[in-house]
Structures are given as structure tokens and as C-alpha cells.
Image (cartoon, rainbow, N blue to C red):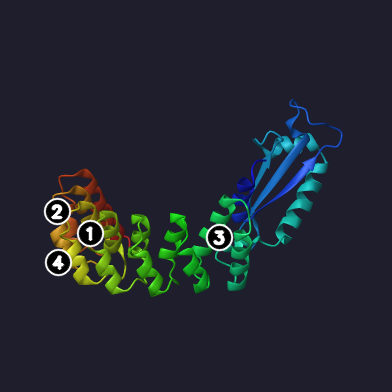
């Protein structure tokens, strides 16, 4: 197979590998099945959910080809490897990705990653740690100042990030990080108010989509000059009827479509939008009405 990062992706997804070698063969190009890798992807309970076979050229091969090549030994190999796969403990990366790691395991994984010379591995772990709601706050404080924007974004959207760190990240140079704060349901009102006036429409739209945004900020953003921001208000289930009625008449079709998609839009507004000049708006309104009829 390939690089360390290649295996780490599998490791994170709770995949274990086994290798089969034909002792009677040597590494020759015209016999790629002399060495076969079996990968077992496992679910949360470590039950096998997917099996893949790879030849020595790193190509995926069908199991019947492998079975034919290895003959009667194949069933024994499958039985042994499957039984072993179910018993192999999850790796720390898999636990982090599934948010199953304890605070102590998170701290240990973070400390280990900082000592590794491979920056890609360090970034992978840092992102997983930053996104984990069990991550200790002292680690979140360190990661909130990480050079990697993706790491800071993960801290910004983490529901366990304290107010003082959200305030720091609300002023981040990266609009994507500020938007992360804007979308975080735990972001306090004063920070949402600050971000509702951000120079970036991408950030303001994040405030508009926040499930805990106050009505006064929704009213402000419903009149935003950026149609993308108004669309965010139109799609938010918390948006009140009077604002939905206003946005249902918006000059931009994507805003009207947002109202048509909103699960809280009243039926009378949906009926109007079902006759909209734009096909995408009509389709969204009709689909919304049909979903309600099936309830």
C-alpha cells in the first residue's frame, strides 16, 4: 500500500488489515495475487460492515478471484481473519473520529501527535481533538491558536468551547473560522450580534442559519444587502411568519426557494410559492406541501 497518511484514513475509519502471502510464489508482475491484503471496515460495535481485497499492485479485486486463487485455504483464512478483526480494539484515531475517546485518551493522543515529525499526522489528530466535545478546555485553548485554519474551525464549532475562546475566534482572520463561531448553537447573543455585522456575507449567513439566533438579528439579516444572507434567514426554521412572508417576495429566486424549503413555512405561503415564476421555487414548495400531506 502507500504512505502513512493512506493507512491513517483507514485507521480513523476503524478498518483493520490482514495480509495473505503465497509462499510458493515470488514478487513478479504477472502474478499480483501472490500477496493479497484484506481490509475489514467495522461499525461502532466492531462488527464487520465491509470487506475489500487488494492485490500486490494495490488494485481492488473481487473476492471470487481471491477464493479461486487460494482454493480450499480461502475459507479458513476468511474465518480466522474475520474472527480476529472483531476482537482487535479500536485505534485511538478511530475512537477520536467516532467521538468515543475519553478525556484522558484525547490528551494522550494530542501529546503523542505533538512529538511526531510528520506535520500531516499532527494536523489530522489536532483536527479530531479540536472537534471532540470531550476535549479538555486547556487543549481547546491551545488549538484555538493553531496555525491550521481547519483546526481553529473545529474549535469554533465545538459545543464545549468556552465563551472566551469563541470571542477570540470571532475575530479570527479567516472568515471560515468566524462563520464556525456564527453557526455554533452555544455562541452567546453578543457575539452573534457582532458577527451579524461582519464584513463577510459568508459569516453573516452563518448567523442567519444559527438555530439559536434571536429574532431581532433575524429581522436585521432579512434585510441584508447580500441575497446569500437573506437566504440563510429564509431557511432557518426559527424565522417567524412575518419575515418569511417578506422573503417570499424577494427579488432573488434562491431566497424564495429558501422559504419554500423551510419546514416551518405556513401552507398559505407555500401555496403562493408553488405558483412562482421560477421552477426551482415551485418544485421546492410542492415537495414541502407533499411532505406535510404524508404526515
Q: Earlier in the sequence, mark 4 or mark 3?
A: 3
Mark 1 Cα-neighbour bin, 10 Å: few <14, some 14–19, many ≥20: many
Q: Could you tell me if residue 173 is visible in this image?
A: yes
Q: Are marks 4 and 3 in contact (CB under 8 Å)?
A: no
Q: Please, is residue 185 above or below residue 272 in the view? A: below
Residue depicted at x 13% and y 50%: 251
Asked if marks 1 and 4 touch (Cβ < 8 Å), the reply is no
Mark toward the viewer: 4 or 3: 3
- Look at the image and tell me in which quarter the N terminus lies: top right
Q: Position of residue 88 (x, y in %)?
A: 72, 60
Outermost residue toward the top in this view: 30
181 left or right of 96 in image: left
Q: Secondary structure at mark 1?
A: helix
Q: CA distance from mark 4 to mark 3?
A: 42 Å
Q: How many marks?
A: 4
Q: Where is mark 1, residue-wise?
A: 234
Q: Which residue is mark 3?
A: 97
Q: Disc 4 versus disc 2: distance between alpha carbons?
A: 13 Å
Q: CA distance from mark 2 to mark 1?
A: 10 Å
Q: Are marks 2 and 1 in contact (CB under 8 Å)?
A: yes
Residue, disc 2: 250
Report the Cα–Cα distance between label 3 and label 2: 41 Å
Horizontal side of 184 relative to 115 (left or right) equals left
Residue 191 is situated, as x and y percent measured from the top left of the image, at 30, 70
Query: Which residue does the image show at 73% across and 53% down from the upper left?
Result: 82
Secondary element at tag 3: helix
Can residue 101 be seen? no
What residue is shown with label 4? 242
Q: Earlier in the sequence, mark 1 or mark 4?
A: 1
Amino acid at each position: 500500500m502507500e504512505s502513512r497518511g493512506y493507512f491513517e484514513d483507514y485507521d480513523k475509519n476503524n478498518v483493520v488489515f490482514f495480509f495473505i502471502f503465497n509462499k510458493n510464489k515470488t514478487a513478479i508482475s504477472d502474478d499480483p495475487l501472490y500477496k493479497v491484503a484484506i481490509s475489514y471496515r467495522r461499525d461502532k460495535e466492531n462488527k464487520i460492515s465491509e470487506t475489500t481485497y487488494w492485490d500486490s499492485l494495490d488494485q481492488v479485486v473481487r473476492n471470487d478471484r481471491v477464493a479461486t486463487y487460494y482454493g480450499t485455504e480461502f475459507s479458513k483464512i476468511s474465518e480466522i481473519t474475520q474472527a480476529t478483526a472483531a476482537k482487535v480494539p479500536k485505534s485511538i484515531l478511530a475512537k477520536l473520529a467516532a467521538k468515543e475517546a475519553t478525556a484522558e485518551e484525547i490528551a494522550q493522543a494530542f501529546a503523542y501527535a505533538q512529538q511526531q515529525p510528520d506535520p500531516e499526522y499532527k494536523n489530522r489528530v489536532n483536527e479530531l481533538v479540536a472537534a471532540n466535545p470531550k476535549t479538555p478546555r486547556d487543549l481547546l485553548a491551545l488549538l484555538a491558536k493553531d496555525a491550521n485554519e481547519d483546526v481553529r474551525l473545529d474549535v469554533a464549532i465545538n459545543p464545549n468551547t468556552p465563551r472566551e475562546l469563541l470571542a477570540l475566534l470571532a475575530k479570527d482572520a479567516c472568515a471560515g473560522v468566524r462563520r464556525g463561531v456564527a453557526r455554533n448553537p452555544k455562541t452567546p447573543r453578543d457575539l452573534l450580534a457582532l458577527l451579524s455585522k461582519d464584513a463577510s456575507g459568508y459569516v453573516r449567513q452563518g448567523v442567519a442559519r444559527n438555530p439559536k439566533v434571536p429574532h431581532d438579528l433575524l429581522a436585521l439579516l432579512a434585510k441584508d444587502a447580500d441575497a446569500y444572507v437573506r437566504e440563510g434567514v429564509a431557511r432557518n426554521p426559527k424565522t417567524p411568519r412575518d419575515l418569511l412572508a417578506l422573503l417570499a417576495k424577494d427579488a432573488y429566486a434562491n431566497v424564495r426557494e429558501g422559504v419554500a424549503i423551510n419546514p416551518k413555512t405556513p401552507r398559505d405561503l407555500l401555496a403562493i410559492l408553488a405558483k412562482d415564476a421560477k421552477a426551482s421555487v415551485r418544485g421546492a414548495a410542492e415537495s414541502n406541501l407533499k411532505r406535510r400531506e404524508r404526515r
